[in-house]
Amino acid sequence: MQLDFDFELDREQSLALGALALLVVFWGVAAASSLGSWSAAADEAAQRRSILAQVEAAQRRGGAANGKAAIAPAAAFLAAPTQGQASALLQAHLTKLVGAQHASVTTSAAQPTTRDDTPDVVRLRATFDIGLAALQALLYELETGAPYVFVDGLSVSPQRGGQSGAEQPLLRVTLDLRALWRRAQI
């Protein structure tokens, strides 16, 4: 008994077979890609859990007396009854610090919170012209003073034609700031 296979394909069958092969390759690549994304997300989650465990362990070891967690002082927060008023307090605080450096805020606006933010976060974007030395002093005061203010974004560009006191060029600075607020009772 001899088997004779004759596999001659016409044009339509060849195209259909080619399309099927492309479809199988496409789904294979899609599956491999999704598995890679899942693996990367799982690795990142594991890293974050590890960091959280380290922070919790450090807090238990070196936390405040009686095993209680260290709590930031009240001055670290903007105290206001609403988030809008807390944004206004942050804007006033920044205006005061910029004014102490002999500059003034050109524009400022409250920014919406991101989905990663907790409900007690306020955000502000402000633009002003200032010299380099004054900018360094301002950033130091912002990040070391109270209330606690975090600089999330900083954009600096030279300002043409503007000169501050000692031939130091002015810089156009845009800051994205974040601060925490506590609801104050009226």
Image: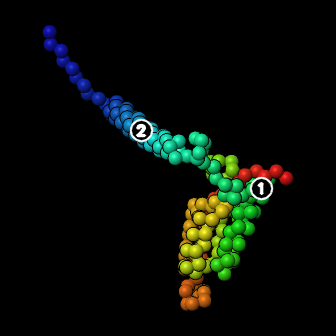
Which residue occupies the foreground of this view, 120 or 31? 120
Q: Position of residue 66 (x, y in %)?
A: 60, 41
Measure how far apart labels 2 and 1 are at the Cα level.
43 Å
The residue at 72%/52% (across/down) is 182
Whether 152 is drawn above or below 69: the answer is: below
Q: Position of residue 41 (x, y in %)?
A: 46, 41
The residue type indicated by label 1 comes to Ala
Q: Nearer the viewer, mark 2 or mark 1?
A: 1
For mark 2, what is the residue? 39
> Looking at the figure, which quarter contains the N terminus?
top left
The residue at 69%/77% (across/down) is 99
Badge 2 density bin: few <14, some 14–19, many ≥20, Cα 10 Å: few
Q: Position of residue 115 (x, y in %)?
A: 62, 48
Q: Is residue 176 visible?
A: no
Which residue occupies the foreground of this view, 157 or 96? 96
Whether 59 is drawn above or below 133: the answer is: above
Q: Does residue 128 appear left or right of residue 84 in this picture?
A: left
Q: Position of residue 35 (x, y in %)?
A: 41, 36
The residue type indicated by label 2 comes to Ser
Badge 1 density bin: few <14, some 14–19, many ≥20, Cα 10 Å: some
The residue at 60%/60% (across/down) is 150
Disc marking residue 80: 1
